[in-house]
Image: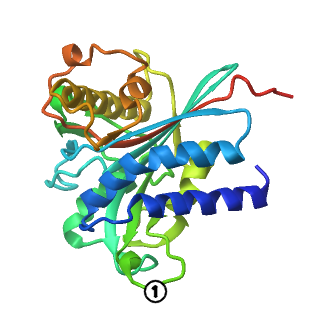
Amino acid sequence: MDLYLKHSLCIDVAYAIETSIQGLTSHQEPDLVASLVTNLPQKLSVVLPQYISGVRFNIGGCFIHQKPIVEFCNQTISTKKPEVGDLLLIYKEVNRKGNRYNALLLQAKKTSNIYNSPVDPQDKHQLALYTQWPKFRYHRAGTLNGQERSICPKTVSTGAQYLLIDENFATPNMPVHWTFWCATPDDVLSASHSLAFQIVDLIEFQTGRPFIEKKPYMDHWSKMIWDLIDISASACFNRRSAGYRNQPRMQGNILNLLNNGNDQLSEQFNDDNIGMSILYIEGDAREREFE
């Protein structure tokens, strides 16, 4: 994408993000994430086609409060159990050669200084997950409980980052202010790109970490992402089956997006609405002419 065009797209995505959280009376992390994933999909559906031609976008989101928790198999690293994350961004590209997938896992953290935000000593177990990827087993993840995953390489990657939420976003009389930023996992977190920039880069496969189609034998990063997609789709299905079809915690046809229209999730999973909040973007580029 042309540099100037990309800059304009990022600005419009940023405005879409900011308007998604306008009017919130609570500025707690879960409320901000919930507002983001339920209000942003419709706005992105308008913005993205204006800049990316030849691609039909289908975008959905869901907010799930009960996030999956894991425990380290090696307890010497930490006996505390980290969350897998607060928000999962998924991009699926459908093209003439097949499908490509990209994922960005985000752990939210509010801060008053997005460029100098030390990780609290009590949260070092979360940092260890994203910087070392020790072998872990699911502890609170529905039917996944007890299953082990070992993500490689065991170091920092662009697939798992911190989502810094600027506590100053509600400051009045500020001309322009972006609330959400992304930071590489480290002892002291420093914003490197806005969330808007990361969303655009995710679509271009310039950030995040690709994963493969679901099949019996996968690398453990791909397996973990599909784990999160499956239990999240199950949680959405359970909410819908319980009469929450019009709940604001889901936006777009997220069930079909996540599970290709499979409505038998309740038979596959029986959790208690544990899953990941997800922003899912699907781009169908099959009509685009390839040179």
Picture coordinates of residue 185, whole percent (x, y) = 41, 62
Q: Is residue 205 visible?
A: no
The residue shown at (55%, 55%) is 198
Q: Which residue is mark 1?
A: 173
- Left/right placement of residue 281 relative to residue 80 reads right
Helix or strand or loop: what does disc 1 sit on? loop
Q: Residue at x 73, y 33 (%)?
A: 54
Q: Residue at x 27, y 68 (%)?
A: 27
Q: Residue 57, relative to residue 127: is it above or below?
A: above
What x and y, as percent, mark residue 208?
52, 47
Q: Is residue 216 visible to the viewer in this orientation of the structure?
A: yes
Above or below residue 16? Residue 65 is above
Left or right, residue 95 beside residue 267: right
Amino acid type, label 1? Asn
Total tally of numbered discs in the picture:
1
Q: Residue furthest right?
A: 291
- Residue 197 image position (x, y, % from top left): 58, 58
Q: Quadrant of residue 145?
A: top left
Residue drawn at x 18%, y 56% is: 78
Q: Give the answer, above or below, for where 194 lies relative to 242.
A: below
As rendered, which of 147 and 141 lies closer to the eye?
Answer: 141
Query: Depth check: 135 or 16 in front?
Result: 16
Q: Outermost residue, bottom direction? A: 173
For the C terminus, the image quarter is top right
User: Alpha-carbon neighbours of circle 1 within 10 Å: few (<14), some, or many (≥20)?
Assistant: few
Q: Height in image: 6 above or below 252?
A: below
